[in-house]
Structures are given as structure tokens and as C-alpha cells.
Image: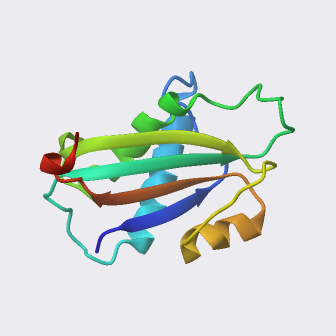
Amino acid sequence: MLPFEFVVTGKPVSHQAKDRKRVQAWKTEVRNTAAACWTVGIPLGDYLRVIITHYYDTDPGSEEGIPDSDNIVKPVRDALNGLIYVDDYQITDFVSRRRNLNGSFRVKGMSSVLAEAFCKGKEFLHIKIEAAPDISELS
């Protein structure tokens, strides 16, 4: 069940995009992709950590047109509401990052989901959902 991860191929759409139909289409794509991978069938009720990494494809140093990582979060969180978790209030820990596919990577213990996405060589969003860390372990 957890960790649960999946990949959505393509450029993510910012929640600030003026074309609301495009934002809704992106949410639908994220939800449909997650649903195809989610075998549990019901949303989780536990506290969670969500990690979203946007692997974009552009020349190093040329990041015009790449959405800010904080602007791609909301459509993804909304898309997973009621499917993976009951409501996004359950997300106690959130990590959002972006990486250029044209960079160098040193990856230990890469999942098959992430490896397959890298092999396609296209821009993608990697979404991983884990149990929230035990707060008694945090310093």
C-alpha cells in the first residue's frame, strides 16, 4: 500500500494558469493516472508525506517557461483528494522539487517506476506518497 508512487508524463500545469480548462484537464490526467496505479480501492485515512518532483527538459541555465514547483502542487493535491487520501488535510509533510533531466544524477535504490520514467526521456512528474514520519522522531 505505502509507499505509493506514480509518474505523469508531460509538462505540469500551474494552478495559476489562465486557461482553467487546461488546469482541469491536467487534474483529470493526474487523477486518472493515479487511479490506474492505485490498487487499494479506497482512500487512506492516515497522516501522509507527499513528495512531488518535476523532472523537466530544457537546456541547463535556460528555465524560462518552467513552472515554479509551488505552483504545480495544488492541482496535484486536488486531483488525489478522495482517491488516495480522504482530504489533503492529512498531508502533514510535503516536499516539492524540480530537477533538469539534462543534469547528472547519482541515484541509489531507484524504484522501477522512476527508472521507467527516466528511460522514456520525456518531461514528467514523479509523485510519491508515504506514511507521515513519527513526530516523536523529529528534532
| Residue at 48 percent of width and 29 percent of height | 70
Q: Quadrant of the N terminus?
A: bottom left
- In the picture shown, does residue 18 fall above or below 74? above
- Quick check: can you spot residue 83? no
- In the picture shown, does residue 119 fall above or below 105? below
Q: Nearer the viewer, residue 86 or 104?
A: 104
- In this picture, residue 135 sits left or right of residue 52: left
Q: Nearer the viewer, residue 42 or 21?
A: 42
- Quick check: can you spot residue 38? yes
| Residue at 71 percent of width and 52 percent of height | 123
| Residue at 44 percent of width and 72 percent of height | 36
Q: Position of residue 60 (x, y in %)?
A: 84, 37
Q: Quadrant of residue 11?
A: top right
- In this picture, residue 2 sits left or right of residue 33: left
| Residue at 54 percent of width and 33 percent of height | 69
Q: Position of residue 6 (x, y in %)?
A: 49, 65
- In the picture shown, does residue 29 fall above or below 75? below
Q: Quadrant of the C terminus?
A: top left
Q: Nearer the viewer, residue 29 or 1?
A: 1
